[in-house]
Amino acid sequence: MHQKVLILDFGSQYTQLIARRVRELNIFSEIIPFNKAPEDLSPYKAVILSGSPHSVRSEDAPRPDLSKIKGKMPLLGVCFGAQFMAAHYGGKVEASSIREYGRANLKTIHSDDAFLKGIEIDSQVWMSHSDTITELPEGAICLASTADVKNAAYRFQNEETYAIQFHPEVYHSTQGTQIISNFLMDIAGFTGDWTPDAFVEETVAELKETLGDDRVILGLSGGVDSSVAALLLHQAIGSNLHCIFVNNGLLRKNEFEEVLEQYKGFGLNVKGVDASDRFLDALAGISDPEKKRKAIGKIFVDVFDDESKEVEGAKWLAQGTIYPDVIESVSATGGPSATIKSHHNVGGLPDYMKLKVVEPLKKLFKDEVRRVGRSLNMPEDLIGRHPFPGPGLAIRILGDITAEKVSLLQEADAIFIGALKRHGLYDRVWQAGVILLPVQSVGVMGDERTYERCVALRAVESTDGMTADWVDLPYPFLQEVSNEIINRVKGVNRVVYDISSKPPATIEWE
Ligand code: XMP
């Protein structure tokens, strides 16, 4: 088993970032809400206390019991975690006279403590708190200060308990990863044994053990997550993994055929099901985006259900769920609030299917899924594929959907995506696509007036799809794409480029 860090979450917006920074050091971490802390701490080698939207001075602030942790194993408190320990063990936390948000610089540093090894004077750190530690508990010593924050970092002597009021997990703390590494590698003795290869080896062994000779069904979407999940399961159980890849008729041009071939090339036991007509029939006349999603979800379940029945004796349903989908975070009101997203493509399968669920990627972040894909020799074009929404082109055709509109949009989309690849821009963009607008406008082609459709190009940069910026694509590139679409896609005479960011816009138009 890998060495693990337990991150106790007090509801900070940055908790996931702590996990990511820790994972970047090839160390495995688990986020658990503070009020669900495990009784048995033996699987963990160190504990990190996250920040929180709460003030330690408020009545309803979280008050974790650290008696089994502090002084018994390496412990790091971040922001709220630091303030909680200061207040709880006899120090003083007060409302600060100035609000401490944003960048600050470390002015004094106790550099002979292993915790701050290699950290430089003036190193930038990110503050985000309105309380401050004015007095340290007995037995604690200050390790670093900024101009405004006296006890920016401190430790309890004769034990491996450290605390910092700034956020090392935020990129603006320029040496934040170094501090986390000092704590975990040098003080807690982690070796960085969490590598994609090790993950594959361990997960395949676990899957073999859990699944034995059982049959498993997996819905492939053509995306990275379900594909990596399939390859892992395939290594573990071979042809007992039955993959189903449904063509809903709303995929990109030729995608169904090409991806199906690719899957077959991996040796996967995969069945391609072309249900385009069923989806298009169900969508006829529907313009409302949510109704479109519901109709697509329903047909997907029906098709998947029909196909699953063909797999005799199947006991498991595999899903490509990843970590951000399952992390439970703690709400600002103190109670744990489960923010579990259902998996877009296979969410909502009916209960009567009675399949047990297996989710081999549920502890990985997206970039880790990609690293695991590489370790499984998955080709780069599949690993780097842009995200694509489950309802596909249906939510990129504003208004009702017809076969003619789908094929027009597929053509325009193929031109845009093909040009991004040709110009080496595809990997610089997080997601791109074309939207068919419910607008017709006047144009002139040759000597004739036209009255045809308009499409919008959308290309965004993002890390997680939660926020996004439009990409500043070169004008000559946009010109080339526009010409190609207008010349080659019959029925389109106007191309526009979407220059809205999210928020306030969204990535998709529906
Ligand atoms: P928005 O439009 O909300 O999109 O900014 C954020 C990300 O989510 C994708 N998206 C979906 N994915 N089913 C999906 O599987 C959906 O209904 C859906 N709606 C949006 C979108 O493509 C982007 O990556």
Image: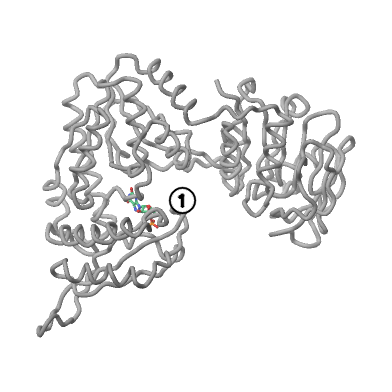
Identify the residue at horizontal 79%, vertical 57% (top origin). Answer: 96
Above or below, comparing residue 232 to residue 327 in the picture: above
Front position in the image: 272 or 98: 272
Q: Is residue 251 left or right of residue 275?
A: right
Task: Give the side of residue 31 with respect to residue 350, left or right.
Answer: right
Q: Position of residue 56 (x, y in %)?
A: 74, 46
Q: Residues within 10 Å of mark 1 (few under 14, many from 20)?
A: few
Quadrant where the N terminus is found in the figure: top right
Q: Residue at x 78, y 30 (%)?
A: 160
Residue at the farthest bottom position: 447
Residue at image point 56% right, 43% down: 16
- Image position of 296 with respect to 217: above or below: below
* Dot 1 beta carbon under 8 Å from ligand 1: no
x then y, percent, for residue 143:
83, 43
Residue 420 position by quadrant: bottom left
Which corner quadrant of the image does residue 457 belong to?
bottom left
Horizontal side, residue 502 vs residue 106: left or right: left
Mark 1, secondary structure of its residue: loop
Tell me which amino acid carries mark 1.
Asp
Decide which of 128, 142 is in the foreground and name it: 142
The percent coordinates of residue 405 (x first, y second) are 16, 61
Q: Is residue 67 above or below residue 367?
A: above
Q: Residue at x 69, y 35 (%)?
A: 64
- Depth check: 449 or 164 in front? 449
For residue 49, side relative to residue 219 (left or right): right
Q: Which quadrant of the figure has residue 180?
A: top right
Image colouring: one colour
Q: Quadrant of the C terminus?
A: bottom left
The residue lying furthest to the front in this view is 423
Residue at which label 1 appears: 464
